[in-house]
Image (cartoon, coloured by chain):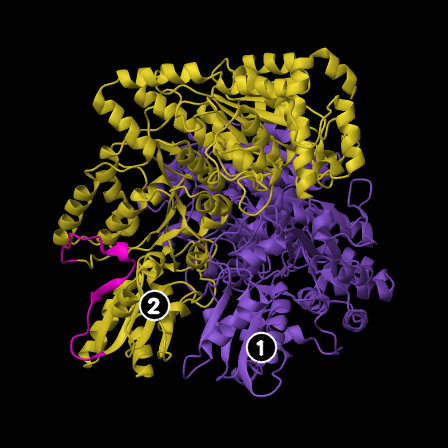
Chain colours: A yellow, B purple
Amino acid sequence: MDIAALRSANPDHWKKATAIRALTLDAVHAANSGHSGAPMGMADVATVLFEKHLKFDASAPQWPDRDRFILSAGHGSMLVYSLLYLTGSPGMTLDQIKNFRQWGSITAGHPENFLHDGIETTTGPLGQGISNSVGFAIAEEALRARFGKKLVDHYTYVMAGDGCLMEGVSQEAIGLAGRLGLGKLIVLWDNNNITIDGTVELADRTDQVKRFRASGWQVLECDGHDPEAIDAALTKAKTGRRPTMIACKTHIALGHAAQDTSKGHGALTDPDQLKAAKDAYGWSGGPFEVPADVKSAWEAIGTRGAADHAAWSARLSEQSERRQAEFSRVMAGDVPKSLPSRIRALKKQISEEQPKVATRKSSEMVLDVVNPIMGETIGGSADLSGSNNTKSKDMTVFDEGNRKGRYIHYGIREHGMAAAMNGMALHGGIKPYGGTFMCFTDYARPAMRLAALMKVPTVFVMTHDSIGLGEDGPTHQPVEHLAISRSTPNTLVFRPCDTVETAESWELALSSKSTPSVLSLTRQGLPTLRTEHKQRNLTAQGAYVLADADGKRQALLMATGSEVEIAMKARDLLQAEGIGTRVVSMPCWELFEEQDEAYRRKVLPGGPVRVAVEAAIRFGWDRWLYGERGKREKSGFIGMHGFGASAPADVLYEKFGITPEAVAEKAKSLL
Amino acid sequence: MDIAALRSANPDHWKKATAIRALTLDAVHAANSGHSGAPMGMADVATVLFEKHLKFDASAPQWPDRDRFILSAGHGSMLVYSLLYLTGSPGMTLDQIKNFRQWGSITAGHPENFLHDGIETTTGPLGQGISNSVGFAIAEEALRARFGKKLVDHYTYVMAGDGCLMEGVSQEAIGLAGRLGLGKLIVLWDNNNITIDGTVELADRTDQVKRFRASGWQVLECDGHDPEAIDAALTKAKTGRRPTMIACKTHIALGHAAQDTSKGHGALTDPDQLKAAKDAYGWSGGPFEVPADVKSAWEAIGTRGAADHAAWSARLSEQSERRQAEFSRVMAGDVPKSLPSRIRALKKQISEEQPKVATRKSSEMVLDVVNPIMGETIGGSADLSGSNNTKSKDMTVFDEGNRKGRYIHYGIREHGMAAAMNGMALHGGIKPYGGTFMCFTDYARPAMRLAALMKVPTVFVMTHDSIGLGEDGPTHQPVEHLAISRSTPNTLVFRPCDTVETAESWELALSSKSTPSVLSLTRQGLPTLRTEHKQRNLTAQGAYVLADADGKRQALLMATGSEVEIAMKARDLLQAEGIGTRVVSMPCWELFEEQDEAYRRKVLPGGPVRVAVEAAIRFGWDRWLYGERGKREKSGFIGMHGFGASAPADVLYEKFGITPEAVAEKAKSLL
């Protein structure tokens, strides 16, 4: 590249863009790690986007109607931090930039949404940002349909690199966005032809222009270092009803000795090369120094949206009080005041009627109560709507012609669904939930982890949660997926035993504001075990005594979900032999772990022999089998010891020895 | 569809194809579950493929040079079972067909490779089969380059549905296959426009023809019920150097009342509709009855390849004995006889030189020893070659121009890589290994589970395995991924503490024939702790005493990987205070679990206080902390309690309290 020509062509633009490059070089140099090349390559595109297109007010990063800017290529985090610092985002100080990648700073190696309000989503695992963005764009369409253009009318801009586009999840996102006609989604592809191992050519020859067009996108191309071309492309991108991908031809690590090489992807720390690059840029001054005129120009960009913001606030205040309150409520993620009473009413009804249904069906019964009073829910399924029971009676399909629809056919795209749901939750104003089979937690897993890390309350409705799935066999029968979900920090894993516990689990999942939930639900029918109505949400304590011992307490049975019925039947067998037996239902280990030790010991007292029963592997159960402290309790486990098999569910339970008789025998053998 | 016209156009073909449809209808009816539509829709394509193109000898399903047939849409398993039964595959009896989806049968709900030799791979989780097939095709190219066309020269045929194509993993596979120019890979797309929720249109409008072409595939189209058109397309597919996708326009559940509907996807069990469909087919006779002439015609197809097979055997016997032995060895998955001695020599050298290196670097040192003597290894990385250290000195890149290359740049496609590796392992003759960051176990997870279920010894090289990764922060720092891998049945999870243990782990991983391995390796340097050379592979027992107590044994420290060094330093601190301390290195829990209780109790005796240290969450450790039986040992855990953070590695260890001092304090607090 002829840097001198770029400098002279548009000096004002050049200085602003170079501020990003210089800050990036300095921060990476100070940290002695990081990724220089992407911010240096995309600085021009970002500058034009922020200067001329992005609707934002730097002083108010949480303004609900701001355009969203998502850096899918999260390793280029210095691009985001530079932009936030330059435009004057509160808290993004120069000291933070100087402490890039250090303990306690908000300028982490990859952008973390929970560290700064101006960061829309956590990126780094490639493909996630572009897939979240589909959710952001869905949320915008849905909220615009609900609250009107006066309150909701913004774009979602995404920067994605080759790494993002090679990931399968982005391909799911591309297909979904094309299908849903998300015209306000604009992807800026950092087309620099470089990955870590070398040129893109090493691993891929896909024609991305054709690939996006094949899924119904508008595709534009521009020189990613020509501000006028970038501006023209962005202007065009905002027209039409299709999502747009702009292929921005860029040079990674522009102007540095490592330009256009894979070395340029990483940390450029050589001081001489750094100086040479700055010299070429015409950038003098010490490390982290931004000339006052350049900083002011950027700050003016940061305040450009203040008038828009004020006008929006005025429009909001013109709405009826009720509408304002509803808008504020959903944006804050609060549940409606009536939710607890509706859930209680359902619980009461269930404990009286005592239906025998699968908990996936129970879940549908809850949704039929919840969705009509929570206009902010958006449900969906990865092509298993009839199996996951995720579509409540009142829901219509979200589509180009029906943006008020609240049900999404995600297609056979578990990962894309999960990532899109995270995007909706991050956007605010939406409570997303979506279903697939529990076993396909595997497919959705990277996005499920990010929900936990990002502290967003996405709800994953995972049905067919054990060998109880039956004939489909071991590929579809989870055995380790409870352990996988439970081992993930900041995740609530609910495995309800009946409709009442399912209602309680949903109440907790919907009320959560910073923790995702996994609902592990059965395919097979289960009796109502909570036949005595309790106002209180017993699931909120994670575990509780479902049936206490009749007579001296000699055995203690612990179970979750479909195996609570088995534990209750085992209790009958044991009590018939005069062995006093307590049954503890443990629908949510994480919430039980949060209780104080006194409660935990009350529920699981020392003394009686313990048997846990769960149609899954033992991994993790030892925490509860061995007792809180003191002597080790005599204990045993009834469950799976490997993968399942293809056969009817009742045959599998019998063959794998997960039966009331086996539980009772195990308890007796320990006495 | 005009079924009568199809019948009359080509009666011989029609009868053969209808045998598949009739068996499918009968088996699903008998099981009262399953998927009828796909086998009924793809019966014509399958018939032409088997009759005119597929090179196979039904009596010898393991003939190494057979064409591979992979049903990626695994729910249509009755297609495979019908074909195996009709062509006379040993063991696939009519009784098996009658016991479709029942306990103990080999006709599981989804095809399971470990139940019958004629099933090439386990499918069901969508997108896996087509992604495996890329590995099958790579294996064929690599083996052909190594052993010549006389021994290796076959095609890989895949049937994939819309569900497969919507999954992200298939998109990764499409990109990879296009890039590698796998001309002998032929995908038959069951283009029936139906998914479980309804028409494909509900969730996708991707033009698949354009999408495949964008990644460099040859794309053909045909009427999937016209045998001549299918034959012509297959003939054409075998020309050229690019992979081919044939879009076969089909009708799901052809000829049934549920044809062309989503209902047709599932179990068609209504007896009247079943009879009506058979009547339309012109198919009389009772359930499971195939007219003798039709069965003979199919059996003739099954023996069509016998002459080819015999000729192949003759060509094999003409090879030198050494070459025959080598071919047999690699196809059997046996390691070379010299492997153990090479590993021992490396261990000896290391224990003398005592390098301080990251275990990812140790792994490279092992590969530099192993790869030159194991021509069957194919390594690679998902665009992290320099970080995963997976490319040994002798390896060149596998490419269109260099089929002898044994290193693959998979691109940023962890999932596609894992699935392709499984395909290579399933093909036979190849020992695949591939690298990414441990945290991206998440992306590869569905294929990693299938490796375990399918009993293939794929090796997953997972580097940067803890907060020791440092500045990249929590998105890149695994904390739950050891638990995830350990909770998966039939998986060996190795977390070596130094180069010696890394060599031992690799020896075990390479020697495994039916269990995949996860190698959890550090980014950061570690000292050599195994400074006393032992001939024996100590890692083979899973855990062992690395350093025993000096004096009375009061404390027992357990650790893996990078934390063994911390445990050893804690031991120094404790011993300095006169507290006799044993350190147990536990590089592989699964192998330790396999030892007899006597050995386990010898390594972890009751009495001393126990402290486990691992830079990961505690989940799963209770198994070892509480003791084998009897009284509960006093114990504690030093490790992570949530997600990590972005900072230099040493700062993170300090801030998260994973230090020798913390371990020693914990032990003392328990005494």
**Vertical placement of A468 versus A455: above or below?**
below
In depth, the one of A223 and B5 nearer the eye is A223
**Vertical placement of B634 versus B74: above or below?**
below
The image shows a total of numbered marks equal to 2
In depth, the one of B605 and B71 nearer the eye is B605
Residue B190 seen in render = no
In depth, the one of A636 and B89 nearer the eye is A636
Residue A543 among those drawn in magenta: yes
Query: For the residue labelled by badge 2, is the local secondary structure a helix, a strand or a loop?
Result: strand
Give the amino acid at mark 1. Leu
Q: Residue A223 in the image: x percent, y percent? A: 68, 18
Q: Residue A582 in the image: x percent, y percent? A: 23, 71
Q: Residue furthest left?
A: A352
Of the two numbered discs 2 and 1 in the rendering, the one whose residue sits closer to the viewer: 1
Give the image quarter of residue B283.
top left
Q: Residue B3 in the image: x percent, y percent? A: 45, 33
**Residue range of the region highlighted in magenta in the rendering:** A531-553
How many neighbours does mark 1 have within 10 angstroms: few (below 14), some (14-19), or many (20 or more)?
many
Q: Which residue is mark 1?
A: B574
Query: Which mark is on residue A613?
Result: 2
Q: Give the chain of mark 2.
A: A
Residue found 41% across the figure and 79% down from its top: B632
Q: Residue A578 in the image: x percent, y percent? A: 18, 81
Query: Which mark is on residue B232?
Result: none
How many neighbours does mark 2 have within 10 angstroms: few (below 14), some (14-19), or many (20 or more)?
many
**Lateral position of residue B487 relative to residue A160, left or right:** left
**Vertical placement of B333 versus A373: above or below?**
below
Q: Residue furthest right?
A: B320
